[in-house]
Amino acid sequence: MKTKKNDKILFDLEAGYDQIAEKFSQTRNFFWRDFEFLERYVFEKDYVLDFGCGNGRLAKFLESKNIKYFGVDVSQKLINIAQKRYPREKFSKINRQDSLAFNDNFFNKIFSIAVFHHFPPTIASFWAKELKRVLKCGGTMIITVWNLKQGGYFIPDKKSNRKVFYIPFKDNQGNVFKRYHHVYSLEELSKIFFDCGFGIKEKFIHNEKNLILIVQKRR
């Protein structure tokens, strides 16, 4: 999994999100309203991991729940923003291809909102296995990725068969970060998690914009 190509993708993602952290956070002050249905998967006293937490807005969304929240991200600058915004929560930086600093079977729930489309399948498989390690048996993981394949919402050419796109984001200084995106289908994403030992509970396209995959650790 640790190839030069994969390492460059992850290095560029870390450096890029550090570069755009301030502007990126400003555009994400609130959790997406059409994702409010995700709250029903969280119960009191759950240990919840926000994998790819960004500025920590999921913590705000779940603040009414009596839970233990942990947020992790590759961008130190986004972690700093999140910790400043939500000082009572626990945020930490993760390295690009290392294990998470949590014990086995630590979490009841894991959220990964708009993260896995930044990974090619080999990296996605690596992180799926690592997230399975820290999830309790029977625990649930909710994954969302942009619907880049269907409907042409993010891709102008609806007939395109390309699997990789670099979508630009401009920071407050005018610098452009071209973010790597892999075009997943629900079938491809589901197979990655199924092959890593998850059972598929639900999979659907939400509001045409996002692919939603809800999986459960089965062994």
Image (spheres, grey):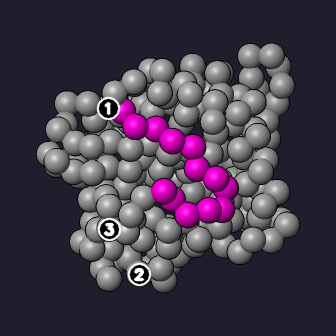
Q: Sequence order check: which comes first, mark 1 or mark 2? A: 1
Query: Does residue 73 appear to the left or right of 111 in the view shown?
Result: right
Number of labelled discs? 3
Tag on residue 61? 1
**Residue on which the image places disc 2:** 197
Query: Is residue 33 placed above or below 27 in the rendered structure?
Result: below
Q: Position of residue 22 (x, y in %)?
A: 64, 21
Q: Which residue is mark 3?
A: 105
Mark 1 → mark 2, Cα distance in angstroms: 29 Å
Residue 212 placement, left or right of 201 = right
Q: Position of residue 92 (x, y in %)?
A: 51, 42
- Give the Cα distance between marks 1 and 3: 24 Å
Tell me which residue sits at (19%, 37%) in the image. Answer: 65
Q: Callout 2 environment at 10 Å: few (<14), some (14 to 19), or many (20+)?
A: some
Amino acid at the residue labelled 1: Phe
Q: CA distance from mark 2 to mark 3?
A: 14 Å
Please, is residue 200 above or below residue 37 in the view? below
- Amino acid beneath label 2: Gly
Q: Residue at x 71, y 44 (%)?
A: 14
Q: Quadrant of residue 138?
A: bottom left
- What type of secondary structure mainly makes up the magenta span? loop
Q: Quadrant of the C terminus?
A: bottom left
What are the residue bounds of the magenta stretch? 89-101
The amino acid type found where label 3 is placed reads Asn
Q: Which is nearer the N-term, disc 1 or disc 3?
A: 1
- Residue 17 falls in which quadrant of the image? top right
For the residues labelled 1 and 2, say whether their Cβ atoms are less than 8 Å apart.
no
Q: State which mark lies toward you, 2 or 3.
A: 3
Q: What's the residue at 45%, 65% (across, down)?
A: 131
